[in-house]
Image: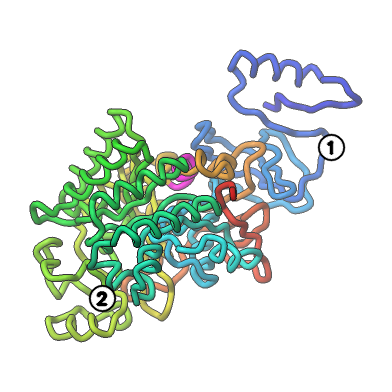
Amino acid sequence: MNLWRGQRKGKLTLGAVTALALLSFGIGARKTVLAEGETYDIVIANGRVMDPESGLDAVRNVGISGGKIRAVSGGTLKGKQTIDAKELVVAPGFIDLHEHGQEPRNYQFQAHDGVTTSLELEAGTDDVDKWYNVREEKSLINFGVSIGHIPVRMKVMHDPGPFLATGDAARRAATEEELSSIEEEMEKGFRRGALAEGMGVNYTPAASHAEIVEMFRIAAKHGASVHVHLRYAGLREPTTGLAGLEEVVAAAAATGAPLHVVHITSMGLKYTPQLIDMVAGARKQGLDVTTECYPYTAGSTALQSAIFDPGWQESMGITFKDVQWAETGERLTAETFEKYRKQGGIVVIHSIPEEAARTAVANPMVMIASDGMPITGAKVHPRGQATFSRVLGHYVREEKVLDLMTALRKMTLMPAQRLEKRAPVFKNKGRIRAGADADITIFDPNRVIDKATYEQPLQYSEGIQFVLVNGVPVVKDGQLVDGVLPGRAARAPISQ
């Protein structure tokens, strides 16, 4: 029912007066802005609109103009263009909090997977202005970044690693002078609009507990969440994933900084349920703690990183045969491990039990994020290309471990809410309502599925029929649209 009909010749219609009265008493749960006779840029017609914020799940028509959703209506809307979404789900565009592949090729795969906003928040950058400038007006989808403790530490300590620390930043404590410089760089990043603070303590194991607490203190000062790859992962006491979680929960409690634990399954492995329980317990005690997972039983990282320092087999409960050289797909041996570690490159790590992955995906508290890797060749972990369609197709439709609305909430509203206090731009993302950004994903719930595999990872997902970014179609009838670059910076306010 259309409650709002707008103003005409300076007078409120009866419908508008009624709507205002209902809203003033908290009865009108949704506001639909619809001017009589208005022609929208695009109308999405007859789709099953699912909005996790309001709980709306019904056939509606959506009117879009100027990059914004202007109307959500049960009545007919007139548009310059019309997308027939009959028997399709119309959902907020997916927000990926954890994607390292921030390049045009990655964005194409992400768009095919329903992602409208791609964020590099775990590793981040050491130069926020430069990072955004490189992508401005050149991106298929929206983009954003954190100020990263790893790259800042590498910059200050002159670490030679191209992406992750391999020298002093990984294996030496910072001097007082270096720590002061790290703090200055982190502060600068926040002033320049970084969305969050990125931290990967597992990759900088020589960083002291005191240094980590200080990084949390800086984040708290700027109202920023800290997106942490825990210091420890795996099964071996006293360096389990649970011990790593204890460190950062304590830092969050001591400083007041919001905490976001990345890829909890690859941190907890078979103990993932215990880590999830600890996050839930911290939340019950009033701490602002959230977490995420990807829907796979393997992780991926650089073989030359500190994660593969001696003791990795006992910690993760795996051996050489469980590590796959991404470039060729071969499983490693003791000999090839040493060879490729010296060479440097990406590996896929088969270490996460299926039950751990299923438990995390099913939990309503655990967000979905891909941890996708840059596409540098033919072989890469499939998660960056297919995470969201895998959840919708495999875990929702086939396995039925969670319902569709819960899955969408974990992909859209919850990531937006994680960031909106620091970056108000996210208050208009992750929702289907009048005034929200027209970042919209339209998919066939009976057909959506991941196609990317470990053997053939560069395959587009199926069933994602239309994707709009700021009101511009980037996927139409399941195909990329050529010649459009509507992605915009998702950034926190800039200060001097």
Towards the viewer: 254 or 436 = 254
Q: Please, what is the three-letter code of the amino acid marked with disc 1?
A: Gly
Query: Mark 1 sits on what residue?
Result: 37
Dot 1, crowdedness within 10 Å: few (<14), some or many (≥20)? few
Residue placed furthest toward the right: 9
* Residue 7 in picture, x, y percent from top left: 83, 26
User: What is the spatial separation of the Cα atoms under label 1 and label 2, in whole angstroms?
Assistant: 62 Å
Residue placed furthest toward the front: 177
Residue shown at the point (43%, 74%) measured from the top left:
375
383 left or right of 33 in image:
left
Above/below status of 13 relative to 68:
above
Residue shown at the point (35%, 50%) measured from the top left:
215
Query: Mark 2 sits on what residue?
Result: 304
Above/below status of 13 relative to 354:
above
* Residue 329 in picture, x, y percent from top left: 28, 79
Towards the viewer: 407 or 413 = 413
Of labels 1 and 2, the one closer to you: 2
* Residue 173 in picture, x, y percent from top left: 24, 62
449 left or right of 421 in image:
left
